[in-house]
């Protein structure tokens, strides 16, 4: 076997390029200049941008606000929501100033050794309609803000300094949620030889798997004459396994089959990853080298059985996620994503749907590593509009290119187990839409024959009639629990996916009385009740989905709308200002769990028990009033005590969906003190207990960091939960104190968020009010190692102090 030369290549400084024969990838993260407005002259190399703002990329120009109800104010009837009359929607796209044109400029230096090489510019997302110029010349453009795309800029580059200018334009009425603005994902320059592996040119699949051996098929497209390809597989510990050398490309493609003995299978529980290193030679000269991470796993979708992973029937316990990261806006950040996914893991969630667009590479890398099944979506519109300036403007010209890039760039991620060609597209109506569905699905199949395609359908009746639903690999129903049976009998596939479910609304820590099920319920404070009984006219509470998931083997799982709150779409307060972010999240915009988190956890997390009481117990003035107590628990029965007095035993039962999944004491009368729940196992033995106590006055600020050690890379973030407790250390659940934040040492203050959908305080300012007694502060590393100190203070409160460590 040939000895591999070490991978010299990734993230080399450009000056080192001369030392490497192969490729260099340079992420353009620093040294950017940014200016909002129209500056066509900014394409010129000599343009003076010294007065422009210095920024780092990923960057979201709109997240710094201010919130303004007039930004992208949409006077529309939201047809999908059943509206017939146009009304003014204020916070629909987040009320953040993302509309308009802006420019980014970056001057980077290429070493002399790059002369005659192939130079590519890769954008992992640019919001939106990017126009890209290099050294005063236009090198290309794209349209969809969520797409990954690249240009071969070899003919435009110069040895030495190169000036990149990017123009971005966000139109109004182009989105149904906050899209973000700017170069919100990574930009990189790739320098490689002309004889090299094509961009996204490798496809690794595992077409045969047994306990003894797996066949790893590696198709690799490469350019250049007389090339040969050596591919070697490594296990997760870096041990070299098997290798194959091929001298014959068919067309441009090498086709290699390499065996892996005793393969370790990838799954959410055991996310084991292998690596294929491919080296392209001409003669004995190494011309290119790439490394692709992959997993060995088998997926199947079968009538009446559903989805199986490695031979085991697996239901999707999934959430939909929009791409924004709350206080960070759309600017991608790996530690923010990792935190979200840790929270989801603990909830027992095993799947993510990137609604309604392409996921970031970072999110997919984490899904591979942490173990999430991934439903990668593409579009919210096809040729028919939902919003005036939506994707329908680009559909004809770009749909195929966008899908090709999505699939080619991400198909080696074992986490991806399904593609989605669209969400609730109005093309569900009419013959043209059926043809479009087939066309798009076939593009996915052509690019990736190993995964099925779905579309999230809300017009279920129409798609039964037209054949639209029947032609999809996976029929996805958005909501409409009442149509599952009919869809199952009419559609031929033999299973149904809850591609979007629930859309229950709630505000963390806010409870409304009387406690009743409601649709589109509004309150004067623009909050929704956390008793988890409120939904939209088209949607439902979680328990109704659970019934279908548990009782119908042909329902293959669900993707709850949504895992986390997001900016924009403040239903049921679409017309109410100030309301600028969603209420749908299982977790709030700050990433703090709402009560609903524990409801899902009680059913989804089968490893660890759940026992959670709601509401809080600070109801001064409501003494003697009926204050129902709910318990979300994995145990089947429990007894409730108020100040030591039993309120009786409740047992889960099938009388209603709620009674099946929640324990509810509806007649409890409020008196201050202690609420205690004792849970029983199935033999009636008391096995766990939990308490909630009435808090006194706010006394002290308490800080709790998700990670105390962060990496000194200028990107890593520690998320510090800030709460206020009384003299006895009991959390004050209604505290709204205005707090101030100060970060010193080897870190910076980045943002704060309290999860209040009606707050107009800007995330990056060093002050914010608590919401329901809590908020989260984001402390970011610099590139220096050392201690990072956070101090949080508030009038009349003992300050909270915390020291983090930033390490190299
Ligand atoms: C769905 C839609 C989502 C979101 C959700 C709110 O119909 O696909 O994008 O709007 O409703 O309930």
Image (tube, grey):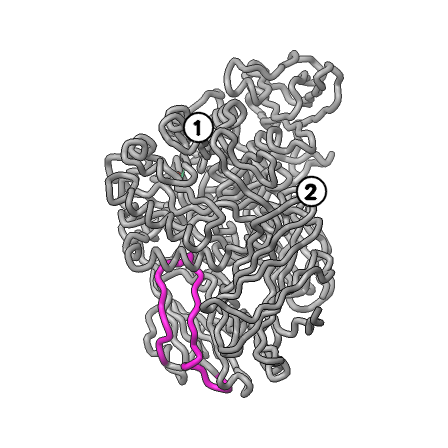
Q: Position of residue 374 (x, y in %)?
A: 53, 46
Query: For disc 2, does the CB lie below 8 Å from ligand 1?
Result: no
Q: Is residue 77 above or below residue 262?
A: above
Q: Quadrant of the C terminus?
A: bottom right
Label 1 sits on a secondary structure element that is: loop
In the image, residue 481 above or below residue 90:
above
- The residue positioned 47% from the left and 32% from the top of the image is 303
Q: Position of residue 541 (x, y in %)?
A: 47, 27
The boundaries of the magenta stretch are: 137-161
Residue 672 appears in which quarter of the rendering?
Answer: top right
Residue drawn at 60 percent across, 32 percent down: 604
Residue placed most toward the observer, 455 or 607: 455
Q: Which mark is residue 700?
A: 2
- In three-dimensional space, the C-alpha distance between marks 2 and 1, rounded to whole angstroms, equals 39 Å
- Observer-side mark, 2 or 1, equals 1
Question: Is residue 57 rendered to the left or right of residue 345?
Answer: left
Question: Residue at the front extreme?
Answer: 248
Q: Residue at x 49, y 22 (%)?
A: 513
Between 352 and 443, the one nearer to me in the picture: 443
Which label was assigned to residue 604?
Answer: none
Q: Quadrant of the N terminus?
A: bottom right
- Determine whether the residue tagged by mark 2 lies in a helix, strand or loop: strand
**Is residue 806 depicted above or below 303 in this figure?**
below
The foreground one among 669 and 565 is 565
Instruction: Pinpoint residue 234: horizontal percent, then vertical percent.
Output: 68, 60
Ligand 1 occupies quarter: top left
> Neighbour class for label 1 at 10 Å: few (<14), some, many (≥20)?
many
**Residue that badge 1 annotates:** 540
Q: Is residue 517 magenta?
A: no
Whether residue 740 is visible to the viewer of this picture, yes or no, is: no
Crowding at dot 2, Cα within 10 Å, few <14 / some 14-19 / many 20+, comes out as many
In the image, residue 147 lies in the stretch drawn in magenta: yes
């Amino acid at each position: 076997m040939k000895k591999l030369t070490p991978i010299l290549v990734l993230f080399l400084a450009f000056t080192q390029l001369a030392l490497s024969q192969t490729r260099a990838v340079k992420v353009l993260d620093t040294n950017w200049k940014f200016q909002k407005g129209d500056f066509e002259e900014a394409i010129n190399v000599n343009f003076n941008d010294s007065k422009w703002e210095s920024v780092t990329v990923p960057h979201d120009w709109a997240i710094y606000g201010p919130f303004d109800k007039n930004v992208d104010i949409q006077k529309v009837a939201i047809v999908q929501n059943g509206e017939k009359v146009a009304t003014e929607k204020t916070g629909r796209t987040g009320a953040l100033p993302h509309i308009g044109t802006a420019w980014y400029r970056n001057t980077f230096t290429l070493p002399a050794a790059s002369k005659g090489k192939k130079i590519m510019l890769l954008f992992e997302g640019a919001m939106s309609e990017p126009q890209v110029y290099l050294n005063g010349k236009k090198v290309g453009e794209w349209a969809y803000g969520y797409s990954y795309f690249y240009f071969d800029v070899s003919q435009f580059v110069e040895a030495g300094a190169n000036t990149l200018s990017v123009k971005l334009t966000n139109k109004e009425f182009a989105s149904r949620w906050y899209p973000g603005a700017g170069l919100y994902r990574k930009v990189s320059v790739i320098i490689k030889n002309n004889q090299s592996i094509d961009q996204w040119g490798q496809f690794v699949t595992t077409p045969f798997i047994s306990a003894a051996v797996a066949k790893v098929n590696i198709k690799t497209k490469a350019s250049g004459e007389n090339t040969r390809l050596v591919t070697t597989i490594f296990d997760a510990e870096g041990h070299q396994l098997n290798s194959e050398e091929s001298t014959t490309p068919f067309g441009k493609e090498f086709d290699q089959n390499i065996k892996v003995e005793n393969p370790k299978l990838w799954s959410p529980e055991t996310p084991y990853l292998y690596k294929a290193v491919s080296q392209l030679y001409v003669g004995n000269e190494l011309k290119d080298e790439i490394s692709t991470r992959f997993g060995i796993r088998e997926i199947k979708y079968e009538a009446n059985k559903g989805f199986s992973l490695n031979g085991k029937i697996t239901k999707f316990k999934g959430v939909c996620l929009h791409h924004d990261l709350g206080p960070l806006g759309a600017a991608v950040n790996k530690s923010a994503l990792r935190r979200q996914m840790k929270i989801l893991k603990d909830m027992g969630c095993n799947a993510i749907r990137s609604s309604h667009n392409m996921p970031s590479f970072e999110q997919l890398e984490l899904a591979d590593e942490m173990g999430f099944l991934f439903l990668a979506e593409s579009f919210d519109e096809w040729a028919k509009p939902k919003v005036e300036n939506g994707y329908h403007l680009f559909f004809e010209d770009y749909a195929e290119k966008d899908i090709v890039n999505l699939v080619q760039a991400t198909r080696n991620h074992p986490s991806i187990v399904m593609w989605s060609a669209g969400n609730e597209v109005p093309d569900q109506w009419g013959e043209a839409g059926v043809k479009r569905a087939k066309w798009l699905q076939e593009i996915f199949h052509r690019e990736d024959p190993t995964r099925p395609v779905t579309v999230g359908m809300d017009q279920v009746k129409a798609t039964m009639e037209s054949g639209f639903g029947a032609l999809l690999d996976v029929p996805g129903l958005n909501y409409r629990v009442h149509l599952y049976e009919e869809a199952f009998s009419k559609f031929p596939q033999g299973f149904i996916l809850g591609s979007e479910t629930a859309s229950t609304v709630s505000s963390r820590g806010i409870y409304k009385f009387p406690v009743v099920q409601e649709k589109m319920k509004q309150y004067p404070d623009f909050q929704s009740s956390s008793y988890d009984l409120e939904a939209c006219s088209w949607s439902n509470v979680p328990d109704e989905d659970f019934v279908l998931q548990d009782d119908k083997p042909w329902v293959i799982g669900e993707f709850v709308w949504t895992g986390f709150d997001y900016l924009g779409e403040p239903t049921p307060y679409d017309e109410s200002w100030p309301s600028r972010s969603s209420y749908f999240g299982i977790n709030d915009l700050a990433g703090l769990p709402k009560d609903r988190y524990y409801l899902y956890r009680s059913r989804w997390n089968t490893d660890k028990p759940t026992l959670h009481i709601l509401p809080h117990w600070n109801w001064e003035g409501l003494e003697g009033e009926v204050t129902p107590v709910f318990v979300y628990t994995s145990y089947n029965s429990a007894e409730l005590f108020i100040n030591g007095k039993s309120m009786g035993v409740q047992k889960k039962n099938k009388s209603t969906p709620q009674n099946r999944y929640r324990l509810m004491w509806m007649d409890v009368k409020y008196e201050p003190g202690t609420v205690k729940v004792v849970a029983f196992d199935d033999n009636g033995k008391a096995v766990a207990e939990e308490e909630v106590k009435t808090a006194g006055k706010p006394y002290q600020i308490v800080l709790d960091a998700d990670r105390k050690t962060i990496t000194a890379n200028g990107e890593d973030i520690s998320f510090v939960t800030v709460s206020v407790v009384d003299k006895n250390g009991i959390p004050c659940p209604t505290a709204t104190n205005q707090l101030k934040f100060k970060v010193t040492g080897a870190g910076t203050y980045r943002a704060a968020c309290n999860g209040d959908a009606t707050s107009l305080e800007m995330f990056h300012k060093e002050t914010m009010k608590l919401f329901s007694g809590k908020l989260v502060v984001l402390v970011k590393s610099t590139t220096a190692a050392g201690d990072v100190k956070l101090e949080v203070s508030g009038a009349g409160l003992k300050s909270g102090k915390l020291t983090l460590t930033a390490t190299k």
